[in-house]
Image (cartoon, rainbow, N blue to C red):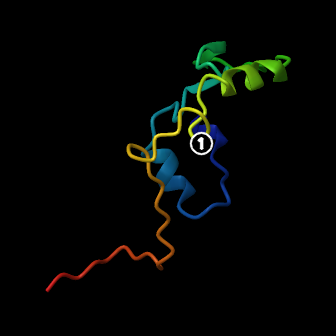
Amino acid sequence: MRKEDIAQDIPHAATMIANSPEILANGGSCLAGPDGEWIIDPVIDQEALIVTTINQQKVREERQNFDPTGHYSRPDVTHLRVNRERQSVLTVFD
């Protein structure tokens, strides 16, 4: 993302452009496989269209390596807790 990508009709566009470096974000688009390895390495400092065909079988294979609710389930170690209370940015302690 470059300075010229900032739309002129957004609030404070001129201030943002005046106070921003020439390049605001240098890309980093990539594709990682289900095993964590790069299928396409991060593309940095250049414009590019990255395209590949995804092997859905690889996803199913990797799911066999980590099954948190099946054979390797460890409820003594892993616990999911859902807090359904309304959240606030302020907590007051007495």
- Asked where in the image residue 50 lies, by quadrant, the reply is top right
Mark 1 neighbour density, 10 Å: few (under 14) some (14–19) many (20 or more): few
Left of 63 or right of it: where is 44? left
Q: Residue at x 62, y 38 (%)?
A: 70
SS of the residue under disc 1? loop
Residue at the left extreme?
94
- Residue 7 appears at what percent x and percent y? 67, 51
Q: Is residue 87 above or below residue 64?
A: below
Residue 91 seen anywhere in this rendered image of the structure: yes
Q: How many numbered circles does the render carry?
A: 1
- Kindly identify the amino acid type of the residue bearing the numbered disc 1: Thr
Residue at the right extreme?
53
Q: Residue at x 61, y 33 (%)?
A: 67
Q: Nearer the viewer, residue 37 or 83?
A: 83
Left of 89 or right of it: where is 91? left
Image quadrant occupied by the N terminus: top right
Residue 51 seen anywhere in this rendered image of the structure: no
From the image, tell me which residue sits under label 1.
69
- Asked where in the image residue 55 lies, by quadrant, the reply is top right
Q: Residue at x 13, y 86 (%)?
A: 94
Q: Is residue 67 above or below residue 6?
A: above
